[in-house]
Amino acid sequence: MSIWNILVAILHVVVCLLLVVIILIQQGKGGGLVGMLSGGSGDSLFAAGSRNPLRKITSVLAFLFCFSCIGLGHIFKAASLRTTTPPARSAPPAKTPAPETPKT
């Protein structure tokens, strides 16, 4: 395992932990999924007037989480391709002498 693999894995774990903490710190709005889908909420994540820094931190951490997942996927795919070996050849079957036919 190279140093880059270890750094991406550590980054992924740190981002996961920070994402959980930041999400738990945020104050709930009570709208849930219905409020988001109905469009009744004026507090958009990327709105110009959005002043909540926790939401912006959450979005940055979410993007980092996605990219670290993709990076780890590529790393482990490449590692599995490198370690995959062709199946071992079995030994050729031993030649057994043909049974002699009795002479009558």
Image (cartoon, rainbow, N blue to C red):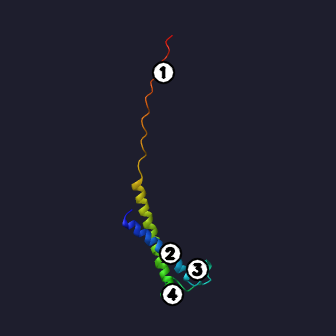
Q: Position of residue 73 (x, y in %)?
A: 45, 64
- 75 to the left or right of 52: left
Q: Nearer the viewer, mark 1 or mark 4?
A: 1
Q: Position of residue 87 (x, y in %)?
A: 43, 46
Which sits in the foreground, 56 or 21? 21
Amino acid carrying mark 2 in the image: Leu
Q: Position of residue 68 (x, y in %)?
A: 44, 70
Sequence-wise, the earlier of marks 3 and 1 is 3
Q: In 3D space, how far apart are the residues under numbered discs 3 and 1 (Cα atoms)?
A: 83 Å
Give the residue at mark 1. 99
Residue at 50% across, 84% down: 54
- Quarter of the picture containing the N terminus is bottom left
Give the residue at mark 4. 52
Give the residue at mark 3. 36
Q: Nearer the viewer, mark 3 or mark 2?
A: 2
The tag on residue 56 is none
